[in-house]
Amino acid sequence: MAKYLVILLLIIIVIREKQRSSTVSIQSLNAIGEIYNKPTAIDTLLAMMAQEGIQFPIVPLAQSILETGSYSSFIYDQNNNRFGMKHNNRGYSIGEKNGHASYRTAEDSYRDYAAWQRKLLNSKKIGSEEEYLQALDNLPAPPWKPGSRYAEDLQYTNKLRGIIKELHRIRSGPSGGNNK
């Protein structure tokens, strides 16, 4: 519970910072974690995802950043939806609001993603972040959108790769080593 309060505090600070500027960056999340002498926000989010059983957590973290507009979207705020998930029958979402799944808590959103990911990983042989990205790129369209793709944006996985590269750069810090 304490880790979720730390994350909530970091998010509130980021939102206040966003009101002062027009963008929220990954760097600002990382800097806030360092200012408060806590693990970086990135490492905290990665650890939380791993605790929920999410594999290759840097990829879902990049998805979360992309899908929520760096944690500034209405879906993120009002639906507790961290991944842009649609309402489904996995038992974690409480309904649909604004075309996306709505959750009681953010933790339920992470659990739903973990359940979705387990199903994907059980159906394919995936052993690395890159194979996971390729699997995302090759997912079929959802049943409610025949003829489309999992991600409507044809550059979706390329955008994820760019975010992942930036996340790795930030985590490695100025000395080139992991700043944990």
Image (cartoon, grey):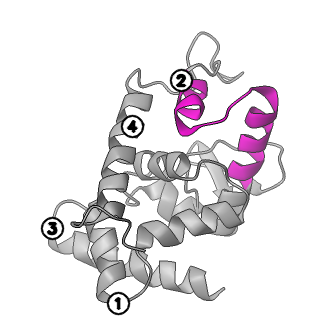
Q: Nearer the viewer, residue 2 or 73?
A: 2
Q: Nearer the viewer, residue 138 or 151?
A: 138
Residue indicated by mark 3: 21
Q: Residue furthest left?
A: 21
Residue indicated by mark 4: 161
Disc nearer the start of the sequence (3/4): 3
Frontmost of labels 2 and 3 is 2
For this view, does 160 lie left or right of residue 115? Answer: left
Disc nearer the start of the sequence (4/2): 2
Q: Say if the magenta span includes residue 117.
A: yes
How crowded pointer 4 is (Cα within 10 Å; few <14, some 14-19, many 20+) is rated as: some
| CB contact under 8 Å: marks 3 and 4 | no
Between the residue at mark 4 and the residue at mark 1, the CA separation in whole angstroms equals: 29 Å
Between the residue at mark 3 and the residue at mark 4, the CA separation in whole angstroms equals: 26 Å
Between the residue at mark 2 and the residue at mark 3, the CA separation in whole angstroms equals: 33 Å
How crowded pointer 3 is (Cα within 10 Å; few <14, some 14-19, many 20+) is rated as: few
Q: Residue at x 50, y 51 (%)?
A: 58
Q: Quadrant of residue 111?
A: bottom right
Residue indicated by mark 1: 36
* Location of residue 105 with respect to 163 vertically, above or below: below
Q: Position of residue 129 (x, y in %)?
A: 55, 39
Between the residue at mark 1 and the residue at mark 3, the CA separation in whole angstroms equals: 21 Å
